[in-house]
Image: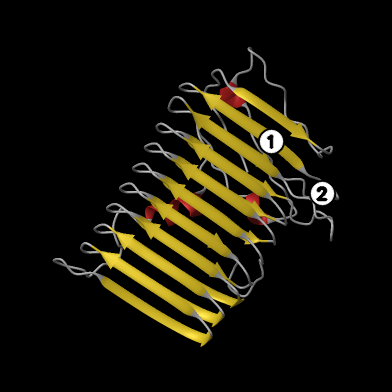
Amino acid sequence: MKMQLTTLAAAVTFALSTSAFAQTPTPISSNTNLTSVDWGVDNDNVGGDDAAWGAGPTPSFTSAQNAVDSLGGNAPTSSVTGNNNLSVSTQTGDYNQASIVQTMSRNESQLKQSGSRLKADIQQLGSRNYSDVDQNLTSGGVVNSLQEGDFNDSRVSQYGGRNNMADISQSGDRNNSVVRQGGIGGGANNNDAKVTQAGNNNDSYIGQTYGDGNYADVMQTGTNGESYVIQRGDNNLAFVNQTDGANDSYIMQDNYGNGAGSGRGHYADVLQGGGSNNVSTITQLGLNATAAAGNAYVTQSGTGNQASVLQY
């Protein structure tokens, strides 16, 4: 896993690690050539981080970016024409509940639920919005998807475990949200994801696929913001709040194998506002440290700031 930043402008960054990590990044000074600095570390114990970050001025979650791009500002398989709305709902199992409300025109929703005591509520109050909810859980999954505006796209996939929750609210135009929790044939229980996007052209990806008790909360109220959160392991917390325009946040937290029953997760909190084109990157691994946990806080206001927090 390798990552580079080409510039580092004024940033207000505070990082605190509650335990020692296996590697220490090279300190940054005013004389550091940032074009040759390697940001991040490739853990041989697990392949989850190998391709998570790309090289370049900003990181790239390739699979996450592809998931967001596949939505593309309109229903990718839409056959809706004229003033019609389309809804397709399939439920198998016991005691599942679903509610779908679509107003205006050319909205499309797809809902699949397989398991027991699963609940989904989809509301699309605009035109040309697309919502896809797929729950294949043992029991207890809940999805709420509300889209007010036009050309908003939301996809929620919850697989393999139980009691995973997702709340999506998009009230501007051309926002994209993807939430993936759990994996087919795998676990991941009691994970929560919350996405609020109240501006235009914002992208959000939350992936919590390996572990239990993770929570991610993303709020974007500007324009052209990007937020990517990937969490593995147990009890990780991630908070992202981006206002104004074109701010980017990338969070990867991975404490998979942190010691059975340690109950220690990473904590990341990003606040970017009062300007535009700020970039925040947080990477916290700690795979080899028993009961390791990292806390990272990034606050940036202004324009063109870049901050990176690495805790191994």
Q: Position of residue 119 (x, y in %)?
A: 50, 73
Q: Is residue 149 left or right of residue 305?
A: left
The numbered dot on residue 288 is: 2
- Looking at marks 2 and 1 on the same chain, the residue that comes earlier in the sequence is marked by 2
Amino acid identity at mark 2: Asn
In the picture of the structure, the residue carrying the numbered disc 1 is: 296
Q: Which residue is nearer to you in this view: 115 or 55?
A: 115
Question: How much space separates mark 2 and mark 1, taking CA atoms?
Answer: 19 Å
Q: Residue at x 64, y 50 (%)?
A: 49
Q: Position of residue 138 (x, y in %)?
A: 62, 78
Q: Is residue 109 left or right of residue 32?
A: left
Query: Which image quarter holds the N terminus?
Result: top right
Q: Is residue 304 left or right of residue 14?
A: left
- Whether residue 141 is situated above or below residue 151 in the rendered picture: below
Amino acid identity at mark 1: Ala
- Mark 1 residue element: strand
Q: Residue at x 67, y 20 (%)?
A: 28
Task: Determine if residue 51 is in view.
Answer: no
- Mark 2 residue element: loop
Tell me which corner region of the image, top left, top right, bottom left or bottom right, holds residue 267.
top right
Query: Which image quarter holds the C terminus?
Result: top right
Tell me which corner region of the image, top left, top right, bottom left or bottom right, holds residue 86.
bottom left
**In contact (CB < 8 Å): disc 2 and disc 1:** no
Q: Position of residue 97 (x, y in %)?
A: 47, 78
Task: Determine if residue 125 is in view.
Answer: yes
The local crowd at label 1, few if under 14, some if 14 to 19, many if 20 or more residues have their Cα within 10 Å, is many
- Whether residue 286 is situated above or below residue 277 in the rendered picture: below
